[in-house]
Image (cartoon, grey):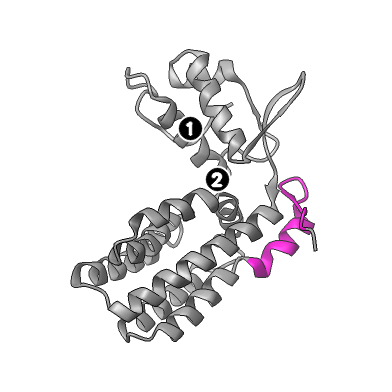
């Protein structure tokens, strides 16, 4: 079993911490470098990171708590399929928090540095159009910037924790299903509304942006049952 993320300790001679192992595996799962159904061997992971099995086991427990891994008796640990119910819940959390954030940012206005940051993050997204990993990093930085601009950077930690299944869907849709140009245009609309100090327009733009992923999830679930479980309860 091989993952795509490199962290301190992988071939560097410095044993990684549980947090670093957890972050590397979480990133591999979110970016689908470890796909749903992949088996996670404690022995192989210990060899990969150059450590004992104990910190690997602790990292896996955290991933189970995140809903990313399931442990099957007598079989082992496996990457869970993407839960549509969890995607919808994450979108609900994001919408509630991020709409409040952009409305307040529009009411206050952006200080110069945060305005420059937002523009730079959009430019980085355009530059990363062919690289979903780099694009999503710039995407997250764009959203996080508004929370930091109004002194609520810790709120983004809540969003980050809740949106992990949402992010897995994002990697399935980029860029073939959801063109990056569409997402960049939506980001520009959000920023324009904030610059114009128009909270209502900022809310509309954010709602439209966060609804984008839901327009394709049902079809994705139907076409990729090996990756996605449709567990939505109407």
Within the magenta stretch, is there residue 179? no
Q: Residue 57, image x and y in percent?
A: 55, 21
| Residue at 57 percent of width and 15 percent of height | 43
Q: Which residue is mark 1?
A: 22
Determine whether 133 is above or below 107 in the image.
Answer: above
Mark positioned earlier in the residue sequence (2 or 1) = 1
Residue 88, visible in the rendered structure: yes
The answer to which image quadrant residue 152 occupies is: bottom left
Q: Can you tell which mark lies on residue 62? A: none
Q: Can you tell which mark lies on residue 30? A: 2
Extreme-top residue of the structure = 52
Q: Nearer the viewer, residue 44 or 166?
A: 166
Which stretch did the figure color magenta? 214-232
Left or right relative to 11: residue 55: right
Category of crowding for the residue at label 2, using alpha-carbon neighbours closer than 10 angstroms: few (below 14), some (14–19), many (at least 20): many
Determine whether 11 is above or below 218 in the image.
Answer: above
| Element marked by disc 2 | helix
| Residue at 49 percent of width and 36 percent of height | 4
Within the magenta stretch, is there residue 231? yes
Please identify the quadrant where the N terminus is shown.
top right
Left or right relative to 197: residue 46: right
Residue 134, visible in the rendered structure: no
The answer to which image quadrant residue 42 occupies is: top right
Please identify the quadrant where the C terminus is shown.
bottom right
| Mark toward the viewer: 2 or 1 | 1
| Residue at 55 percent of width and 49 percent of height | 164
Q: Residue 7, image x and y in percent?
A: 38, 31
CA distance for labels 2 and 1: 12 Å
Q: Residue 70, image x and y in percent?
A: 68, 33
Q: How many marks?
A: 2
């Amino acid at each position: 079993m091989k993952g795509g993320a490199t962290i301190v300790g992988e071939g560097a001679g410095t044993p990684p911490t549980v947090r670093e192992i957890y972050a590397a595996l979480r990133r591999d799962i979110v970016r689908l470098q470890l796909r749903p159904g992949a088996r996670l061997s404690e022995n192989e992971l210990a060899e990969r990171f150059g450590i004992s099995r104990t910190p690997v086991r602790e990292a896996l427990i955290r991933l189970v708590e995140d809903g990313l891994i399931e442990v099957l008796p007598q079989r082992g640990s496996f990457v869970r399929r993407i839960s549509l119910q969890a995607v919808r819940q994450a979108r609900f959390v994001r919408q509630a928090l991020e709409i409040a954030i952009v409305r307040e940012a529009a009411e206050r206005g952006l200080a110069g540095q945060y305005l420059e940051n937002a523009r730079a993050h959009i430019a980085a997204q355009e530059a990363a159009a062919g690289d979903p990993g780099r694009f999503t990093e710039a995407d997250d930085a764009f959203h996080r910037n508004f929370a930091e601009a109004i002194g609520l950077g810790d709120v983004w930690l809540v969003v980050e924790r809740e949106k992990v299944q949402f992010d897995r869907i994002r990697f399935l849709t980029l860029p073939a299903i959801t063109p990056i140009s569409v997402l960049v245009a939506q980001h520009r609309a959000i920023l324009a509304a904030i610059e114009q100090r128009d909270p209502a327009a900022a809310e509309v733009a954010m709602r439209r942006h966060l609804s984008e992923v839901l327009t394709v999830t049902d079809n994705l679930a139907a076409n990729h049952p090996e990756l996605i479980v449709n567990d939505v309860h109407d």
